[in-house]
Image (tube, rainbow, N blue to C red):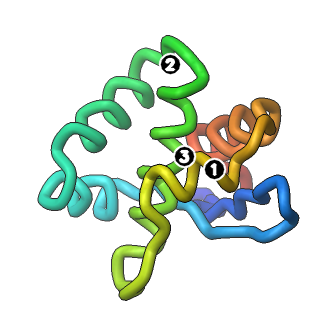
Amino acid sequence: MENLNTTVKHTFCDGSTVECTITMSRVLALSNKNKELHKLMGRMISKGSEDIFEMIRFVYGAYLCANMNTEEVLTEEEFIDKCGADYVGITKTMRELINPKK
């Protein structure tokens, strides 16, 4: 079995980075904290996204999954603000999460 890199760094417009992951155990754990976001992520993994804001929410969910044991996390609004207008960066992070590499 291949050892896939399941953690991706997302870079914000200001150059700061955060870790993101969508391992099955973390996405399942997210369902206990945010059922709506969990449902959106599951649909997007299987069927894709409908617009850029779904993609941003997906990456935010992956950020929450990677930072579940962190006391202080960005709110969704703070995360969106830090994304600025970097649509390409959001798309790249989402693609790397869904299709991890070795």
Report the disc number at residue 81.
1
Instruction: Report whether 11 appears left or right of 28.
Output: right
**Who's the residue at 50% across and 61% down the image?**
63
Q: Position of residue 94 (x, y in %)?
A: 62, 39
Say which residue label 3 marks: 59
In the depicted structure, whether residue 89 falls above or below residue 64: above
Figure quadrant of residue 41: top left
Going by the numbered disc 2, the residue's amino acid type is Ser
Q: Secondary structure at mark 3?
A: helix
Figure quadrant of residue 18: bottom right
Give the mark, 3 or 1, whose residue is nearer the N terminus. Answer: 3
Say which residue label 2 marks: 49
* Contact between labelled residues 1 and 2, with CB atoms less than 8 Å apart: no
* Contact between labelled residues 2 and 3, with CB atoms less than 8 Å apart: no
Going by the numbered disc 1, the residue's amino acid type is Asp
Count of numbered circles on the image: 3
Q: Nearer the viewer, residue 71 or 63?
A: 71
- Calculate the distance from the C-alpha at mark 3 to the C-alpha at mark 2: 12 Å
